[in-house]
Amino acid sequence: MKIRFISQLLTSEKSSKHPEKSSSKNKTGIMLLFILTLFSFKGAPATEENIKGSAHHKNFIISSEDHTVDNCYNYLTELVRSSNFPFSSWKIDRSKVNLLIDEEDSETITCKLFYDTEGTGTIGWIKYHKKNGKLFNTSAELDHAVELKYNLKWRSLFNTCTSKK
């Protein structure tokens, strides 16, 4: 239907008696075609289900704004936010910090800590050991990883949630 409309628009322009007006109408028609083409390729919005179902996902952004029970990684986000990671040196409210999972295997989860900004917003890196619950600040500026303390409530919630899956 869009193509038929554009085709009619362009056909009617070619039969114009005034070439200078026809050129202007052609430009308008081409712009309209371009805009309609852009909208016709609009994909489905990214959702957690789409990301998890993708065979190519490596990084997964975690934010506590989605409080669904099935999203165990929200508990990991809160675990990190409750830790003694040096958020204050970045002058950012810890509730604004999100995680981007870089690597995950059966034993550990490595995440980038970031916040929304016009730049990268990266404030550091952490590694969480699933079996013993140890959390480490592994940021690049450190000579060695520093073990962090956190509210154990979030470990319990994360472990309970992941054991159900």
Image (tube, helix red, strand yellow):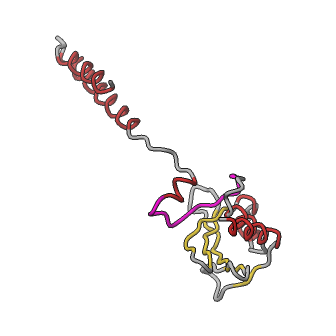
Q: Relative to 57, is 9 on the left or the right?
A: left
List x then y, in percent, for residue 156.
79, 71
Q: At x 22% / y 23%, what residue is drawn?
A: 23
- Nearer the observer, 55 or 64: 55
List x then y, in percent, for residue 165.
65, 65
Q: Quadrant of residue 14?
A: top left
Q: Is residue 101 magenta?
A: no
Q: Quadrant of residue 134?
A: bottom right
Q: Quadrant of residue 155?
A: bottom right
Q: Relative to 161, is 4 on the left or the right?
A: left
- Nearer the observer, 145 or 132: 132
Q: At x 67% / y 58%, what residue is drawn?
A: 71
Q: At x 67% / y 64%, what residue is drawn?
A: 73
Q: Is residue 56 magenta?
A: yes
* Magenta segment: 54-66
List x then y, in percent, for residue 67.
72, 53
List x then y, in percent, for residue 144.
65, 88
- Nearer the observer, 110 or 94: 110
Q: Relative to 86, is 20 on the left or the right?
A: left
